[in-house]
Image (cartoon, rainbow, N blue to C red):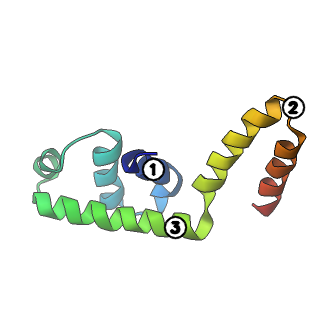
Amino acid sequence: MPKELHISDLLDVYGEFLNGKQRELCEYYYNDDLSLSEIAENVGITRQGVRDIIKRAGQRLEDLEEKCRYCERFSKLKELSESARKGDRQASEQIFDIIDDL
């Protein structure tokens, strides 16, 4: 998965743990696909300031995922559900194991 999509997924799950400015700038960058320069112009800070905020926020999201693993588990559940729908009993058991661990 490309890094931008990965961070966008993390933002969906953990975005509320960022401060308002971090979340806003990350949404512009990862979800709205605005450039650093466009964001800087829109919010009235330097391009470097935008980059720094987005970089720190991305690291915070990665740290949260490392601790909680919700996105990883969700991806695994999606993968296993396809197999389970095809009758794979082992996949069904793995789904239950993941859910039990939550």
Marks 2,3: beta carbons within 8 A = no
Q: Is residue 95 left or right of residue 54?
A: right
Closer to viewer: mark 1 or mark 3: 1
Position in image of residue 33 (x %, y %): 27, 39
Quarter holding the C terminus?
A: bottom right
**Amino acid type indicated by mark 3:** Leu
Image disc number at residue 6: 1
For marks 1 and 3, give the CA distance.
13 Å
Circle nearer the N terminus (1, 3): 1
Position in image of residue 45 (x %, y %): 12, 59
For marks 1 and 2, give the CA distance.
30 Å
Residue 49 lies in quadrant:
bottom left
Residue at screen point 53% across, 53% down: 13
Position in image of residue 61 (x %, y %): 45, 63
Circle nearer the N terminus (1, 2): 1
Q: How many discs appear? A: 3
Residue at screen point 37% across, 47% down: 4
Q: Is residue 60 left or right of residue 24?
A: right
Helix, strand or loop status at disc 1: helix
Residue 45 in sight:
no
For disc 3, the marked residue is 64
Image disc number at residue 87: 2
